[in-house]
Image (cartoon, coloured by chain):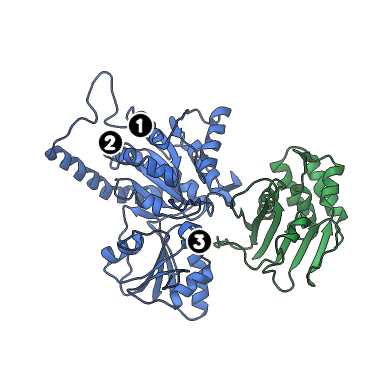
Amino acid sequence: MYEIRIHSRGGQGGVTAAKLLALAAFRDHKYATAFPFYGAERRGAPVVSFVRISESPIKVYSQIRKPDLIVVLDNSIMDVVDVLHGLKPGGKVLLNGTLPHDMKGFKTLSVDLTSIALRLNLVVAGSPILNTPVIGALAKMGIVSKDSAKLAISEMFSDDRNVQAAEAAYQELVI
Amino acid sequence: MLMISTGNKAVASAVKDAKPSVIAAYPITPQTEIVEQIAEYVSSGELMSRYIMVESEHSAMAACIGASITGVRTFTATSSHGLLYMHEMVNWAAGGRLPVVMANVNRAVGPGWNIWAEHTDALQERDTGWLQVYVGTVQEAYDATLMAFRIAEHNDVLLPVMVNLDGFLLSHINQSLQTEDVGDFIPPIQLPHAIDINNPRGYGTLTGPDDYFKFRWDIERSMRDSVKVIEETQGEFAKRFGRPYGFTEDYRCDDADVLIISMGTLGKEAEVATDLLREEGIKAGSMRIRWFRPFPDLDIAGKEIVVIDRDYSFGSGGILAEAIRSRCRVEPYSVIAGLGGQEVTYEDIAGFVRDRRPGEEYWFGVKPDV
């Protein structure tokens, strides 16, 4: 079982990113679950979402304590949340943007999702949409297939720019 | 159709496919997504139902009762304080022999104000004459809701059915969901005591002890008869749609020395704990109670029992543990865990089994002197 924790702020689309990723894994014919931790959610507050992907049915409902991968949609969260908490030895981190951070030796990848969203004018209520480009980056990392990533995005969003954003992140992420 | 869905949306999909004539509901966290989604189905024309927006849960159930007595299919959904607010009418639906179907998203009861999973809300309604089923996956939320209509409306039952799903853990998780072309799986409703303007009768009139006693016995007789209706419905469901269900979901129980008995998503997590314990040489099994009313006959003789209650009856004990103790004549190790959404992992559950002390009660995460 591969376990992913997504850190975002309320309104940035972390919860939807988790759902998209689960849907893409599902379209890869794998089992997947996606769920947020629900506290007192509001725009701008740190939010955590979880995704599990497995070859066999997933019976675990508790929160992910030891993730294989951590995704950070807003790097400023790292000032207030220990995003690396519980990350497995050999685990990976995907960051939005290129700001340097001490990732304590964990394999860290980054891609500027915000710029991709702004370039395509993927903005809702003043916030750049990060949940569709990040799926492209995760496809590049091999978490889901590229075809399933695009399929999942087009199933949930009719605006083709979302698929374009995922394609851009796929191209721009350097493995 | 194969899709990805939350537990709430799975319930709404089942309601769309069961096509009730009247839906009356009031939103409450974490159930709101059910009634929102149904409202969308009604406004888009995908579901041709009368959707009654009410000012309270008491009115929601009262509206379902009023509609049901005319002989049509009805549905509502609620949670926690909403369920308790409709408590009077919950009794009335069962006593009136009205096959209302309700989804209850299990949530703790305040104070302290808490929106997370606990079963005490529904278990406070256990003596009302409603059938109660507790589900463990998004797919099961859909399947159980569909079956609830057929079971409730069967003329050997004619009692309301409550489908229970864990708040957030199940209501808000995304999992795969297979929806079905339901066809004639749920026959048209035929309520024998429906209001008939050509044959006026009184409903809910003052009833003396002799008749009242008969009515009460009649509820119990139907509750007992519901056992075979549930079996038959689950059998037919498995035949048509390929997913079998029982009164319990048993995992590695046959050769087990110690059984973990629980309800809801805890029962799925307990299956993982079972595998972990088996690797350590402890012959564990998981029995997830699906139907709490009618309470099933359990074949657990000769096994050690660990009951996990996500609920409590103050001054008495875990409500599931009490049921097991009195009906099965065993002394379980009673674990109280998961109240108010407390995290309970499969590793925690394995720990309960390793440290079991038959006959004792243990509050997970509470130190004895606090």
Whether residue B181 sits left or right of residue B159 in the image: it is: right
Quarter assignment of residue A70: bottom right
Q: Which amino acid does label 1 sit on?
A: Ser
Residue type, mark 2 in image: Gly
The chain to which mark 2 is attached is: B
Q: Distance between the residues labelled 2 and 1?
A: 10 Å
In x, y percent, where is residue B317? 33, 63
Q: Mark 1 points at which residue?
A: B68
For the residue pair B245 and B161, the one nearer the viewer reads as B161
Q: Residue B96's mark? A: 2
Question: Mark 3 highlights which residue?
Answer: B342
- As helix, strand or loop, the secondary structure at mark 3 comes to loop
Question: Which structural element holds mark 1?
Answer: helix
The answer to which of B103 and A104 lies nearer the viewer is: A104
Using the image, determine if residue B174 lies above or below residue A69.
Answer: above
* Circle 2 SS class: loop
**Residue B366 seen anywhere in this rendered image of the structure:** yes
Relative to B259, is A116 on the left or the right?
right
Identify the residue at horizontal 43%, vertical 40% (top origin): B185
Verify CB contact (< 8 Å) between mark 1 and mark 3.
no
Label 1 neighbour load within 10 Å: few <14, some 14-19, many 20+: many
Where is residue B288 drawn, in percent x and y? 42, 61
Chain shaded green = A
User: Which quarter of the figure is the N terminus of chain B placed in?
Assistant: top right
Indicate the amino acid at tag 3. Gln
Callouts 1 and 3 on one subunit: yes
Write down which chain is painted blue.
Answer: B
Q: Which residue is drawn at 34% across and 64% down?
A: B321
* Front of the two marks 2 and 3: 3
Residue contact between numbered discs 2 and 1, judged by CB atoms under 8 Å: yes
Give B114 or B124, whichever is nearer the viewer.
Answer: B114
Structural distance between the alpha carbons of marks 1 and 3: 38 Å
